Image (cartoon, grey):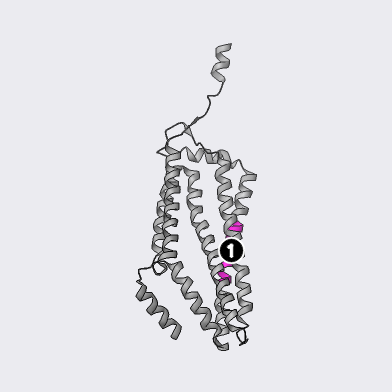
Amino acid sequence: MADILFDETPAPPQYDFVVEPLLLLTSFVLIFTYHAIHHRYIVKKPEHTVFGFGRVFRTIWVEKILSDNKHAILGVQSIRNEIFIGIFIAKSAFVAVTVIIAAASSVDLSKRLEMLSTLDFLVPAGKSSVVPSSVKISLVLILFGGVFLCSTQYLRLLRHMSLLVGCSSCEANKEEVVKMVAKLYDRAAACSWWANRQMLVSFPAVAWAFGPTSCLLSTVIIVIFMVVVDWLNLSSKELMTRLTSLSKA
């Protein structure tokens, strides 16, 4: 009788304490190192990054838009186009959060994710993930929630900008208006950048549900994508030449 009871007792789950932590640490180091290098170039050599170039260009754009009343309409239309993009990103993030919460509440999502993680070919057979599936779901929700919050903040700053662009006729305070609009535009661009980063990082977070190997491969693809879209091959002289031509246009 004791032997029968012993045979029916389920074996305790075996966890992978080597492969998964190593792959996840590699993914984190790749993303952190890339953004550390990227931030250093934004501060030291802005001409080599899209964000650094945009920071300089935005000030020139604001000065040009507010220099004459006939440019104010163009400025409002440009801001409106950016608002449409921000609304689309915010709606997409909100829908993603809603779908994840609905799926987690209607089906046993944690167990299904555990089954998916066993398909990873680098994880030893029979080993379970060290991290609970609820943590993976929470991470994805936090990332998409961050995308939604940053996008709404981006929209709020753009709305303030559109109001101030209408003050271009105030000759007495034009310099202060230009500084204020440029500052708001920089903050809006930073919020948009953070929303974009969190959306990109959400891909490895979702791929983690299929195992740490998928997470690492997705991280490598995302880093390569960011290298392509974040960097410019411009020298300081070329940057100043282009900005000068834009300011005189």
Q: Residue 136: x percent and y percent?
A: 54, 44
In the rendered image, the quadrant that contains the C terminus is bottom left
Check if residue 86 falls in the magenta segment: yes
Q: Main secondary structure of the magenta part?
A: helix
Look at 58% across and 84% down and name the residue there.
73
The percent position of residue 166, horizontal first and vertical second, equals 62, 82
Frontmost residue, 80 versus 36: 36
| Above or below: residue 190 compared with residue 198 | below
**For residue 83, above or below residue 41:** below
- Using the image as rendered, state which of residue 95 and residue 158 is in the foreground: 158
User: Vertical placement of 107 versus 187: above or below?
Assistant: above
The magenta stretch is: 82-95
219 or 84, which is in the foreground?
219
Q: For the N terminus, which image quadrant?
A: top right
* Quadrant of the rendered image containing residue 148: bottom right
Instruction: Verify whether residue 59 appears in magenta.
Output: no
Q: How crowded is mark 1: few (under 14 residues within 10 Å), some or many (20 or more)?
A: many
How many numbered markers are drawn? 1
Residue at point 43%, 60% (across, down): 40
**Residue at horizontal 60%, vertical 50%?**
100
Question: Tag 1's secondary structure?
Answer: helix
Q: Does the image show residue 119?
A: no
Instruction: Tell me which amino acid carries mark 1.
Output: Ser
Q: Can residue 155 be seen in this view?
A: yes
Q: Name the residue under label 1.
A: 151
Residue 172 x, y percent position in the rendering: 62, 86
At x 53% / y 68%, what residue is drawn?
189
User: On screen, 138 above or below 149?
Assistant: above
Give the quadrant of residue 147: bottom right
**Residue 85 horizontal/vertical position (percent):** 55, 68
The quadrant holding residue 228 is bottom left
